[in-house]
Image: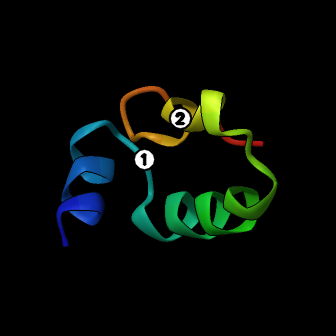
Amino acid sequence: MSLIRSARMNGHDPYAYLKDVLTRLPMQRASEIGQLLPHQWVPA
């Protein structure tokens, strides 16, 4: 629930945010995981 609220607070559509993050997560490097946080996320 906090990810959904954080996405909304940062002006993102929660569904689009979660879908993109869950798609990217398996391929994301551990050192770049911070890019998937709502305040740093950029849609693919």
Coordinates of residue 34 in the picture (x, y in percent):
49, 31
Viewer-nearest residue: 16 or 28: 28
Q: Is residue 31 above or below residue 3?
A: above
Q: Are marks 1 and 2 in contact (CB under 8 Å)?
A: yes
Mark nearer the viewer, 1 or 2 = 2
Colour treatment of the image: rainbow
In this view, the residue farthest toward the front is 30
Report the quarter where the N terminus lies.
bottom left
Q: Position of residue 25 (x, y in %)?
A: 67, 58
Question: Could you say which disc has been placed on residue 43 in the image?
Answer: none
Amino acid under disc 1: His
Q: Quadrant of residue 27?
A: bottom right
Give the left or right position of residue 8, taking residue 18 as reference: left
Dot label at residue 41: 2
Q: CA distance from mark 1 to mark 2?
A: 9 Å
Quarter of the rendering containing residue 26: bottom right
Q: Nearer the viewer, residue 34 or 2?
A: 34
The mark nearer the N terminus, 1 or 2, is 1
Which residue: 28% across, 64% down? 4
Q: Secondary structure at mark 1?
A: loop
**Left or right position of 33 against 44:** left
- Classify mark 2: helix, strand or loop: loop
Q: Which mark is residue 12?
A: 1
